[in-house]
Image (cartoon, rainbow, N blue to C red):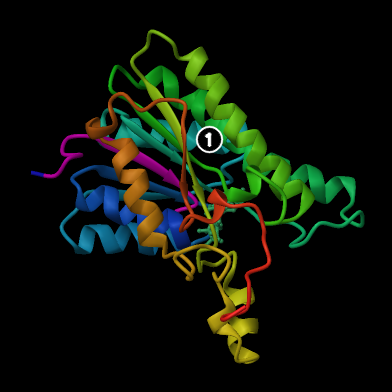
């Protein structure tokens, strides 16, 4: 029997990348999954799950509007009768690198999707969750320090980390836990252009070289951390940020000495 047998999960941003990997793994561990995304490929994610014998449904919605969030939470209850796990994961990159050229509208859109979206989903989900409920937000190493994304993106992910800490306090006494995963560089829909550009230039071997594992991560590796935090195995882990970054965050930048010097 899977560790999540009998539980019901909502995963946002489930059409692609980390969200799809999370939806598949939570289902493999026994959860019924409502996959949510604004992209139509979310239907394929639910199809992959049911094709493997799991329970799933899909909703196409904007995860950062009150209307969209209310609709998918209601759908989860309608489909599966309860709610135990929320993986608030949908996100956008905005400007790839820090720049003062990112205007207020683009900045606000990144905050809306990446920060207000998870808050709306948490607020709508909590009334349906009981003791043992688990919320996982996808933050990023970009939210922990500079150097991994644009200004709005990084600020939004720093906001997600504080959202998790503040909400853990807000949920005191409920038995509902909330944590974040903070992935490093992972090849997904969000980052494939970066990987493709490196491959085109024959520089794919340079990707991920700043972390001690000397490689980028896989969506399934982030999903493993999500599945742990979702499960009762993490029953005393609350308000934390679990970096899934190959050890990137363990060091300040330094210039490695050339061999033999
Ligand atoms: N890929 C990385 O290197 C990396 C690193 C750290 C954190 N993250 C975070 O992981 C999460 C998942 O991203 P990914 O890398 O899998 O990228 P992705 O582009 O493959 O997946 C993101 C999904 O979110 C959906 N989405 C975006 N805005 C939405 C909205 N308003 N409503 C509904 N769906 C929406 C997209 O359609 C897409 O399917 C994001 O929060 C991202 O910031 C990614």
Image mark count? 1
Left or right of 49? Residue 165 is right
Q: Is residue 253 inside the magenta stretch? A: no
Residue 81's image quarter? top left
Where does the image place residue 102, in percent across and percent down from the top left?
87, 54
Residue 21's image quarter? bottom left
Quarter containing ligand 1?
bottom right
Please state the extent of the stretch shown in magenta in the rendering: 2-14
Q: Residue at x 48, y 55 (%)?
A: 247
Disc 1 under 8 Å from ligand 1? The reply is: no
Residue 65 seen in the current view: no
Helix, strand or loop under label 1: helix
Left or right of 56? Residue 171 is right
Where does the image place residue 242, in percent across and percent down from the top left?
45, 41
In the rendered image, the vertical position of residue 248 relative to residue 178, given as above or below: below
In the rendered image, the vertical position of residue 261 relative to residue 24, given as above or below: below
In the rendered image, the vertical position of residue 123 relative to residue 174, given as above or below: below
Where does the image place residue 92, in percent across and percent down from the top left?
64, 54
Task: Identify which residue, 186 or 104, lies in the foreground.
Answer: 186
Q: Quadrant of the C terminus?
A: bottom right
Magenta stretch: dominant SS? loop
Q: Is residue 4 inside the magenta stretch? A: yes
Left or right of 167? Residue 102 is right
Farthest left residue? 1
Where does the image place residue 30, in percent across and percent down from the top left?
18, 45
Residue 99's image quarter? bottom right
Q: Residue at x 29, y 32 (%)?
A: 234
Farthest front residue? 261
Q: Quadrant of the N terminus?
A: top left
Pointer 1: what residue?
69
Residue 234 seen in the current view: yes
């Amino acid at each position: 029997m899977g560790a999540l047998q009998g539980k019901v999960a909502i995963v946002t941003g489930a059409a692609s990348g980390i969200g799809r990997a999370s939806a598949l793994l939570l289902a493999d561990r026994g959860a019924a999954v409502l996959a949510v995304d604004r992209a139509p490929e979310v239907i394929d994610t639910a199809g992959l799950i049911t094709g493997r014998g799991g329970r799933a449904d899909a909703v196409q919605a904007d995860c950062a509007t009150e209307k969209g969030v209310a609709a998918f939470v209601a759908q989860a209850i309608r489909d599966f009768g309860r709610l135990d796990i929320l993986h608030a994961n949908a996100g956008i990159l905005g400007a790839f690198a820090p720049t003062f050229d990112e205007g207020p509208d683009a900045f606000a859109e990144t905050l809306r999707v990446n920060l207000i979206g998870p808050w709306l989903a948490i607020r709508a989900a909590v009334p349906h969750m009981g003791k043992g409920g688990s919320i996982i937000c996808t933050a990023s190493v970009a939210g922990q320090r500079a150097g991994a994304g644009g200004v709005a993106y990084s600020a939004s992910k720093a906001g997600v980390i504080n959202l998790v800490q503040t909400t853990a306090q807000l949920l005191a006494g409920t038995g509902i836990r909330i944590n974040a995963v903070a992935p490093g560089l992972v090849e997904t829909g969000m980052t494939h252009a970066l990987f493709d550009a490196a491959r085109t230039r024959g520089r794919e071997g340079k990707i991920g070289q700043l972390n001690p594992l000397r490689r980028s991560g896989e969506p399934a590796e982030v999903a493993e951390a999500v599945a742990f935090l979702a499960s009762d195995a993490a029953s005393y882990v609350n308000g934390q940020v679990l970096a899934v970054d190959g050890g990137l965050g363990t060091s300040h930048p330094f210039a490695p000495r050339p061999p033999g010097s």
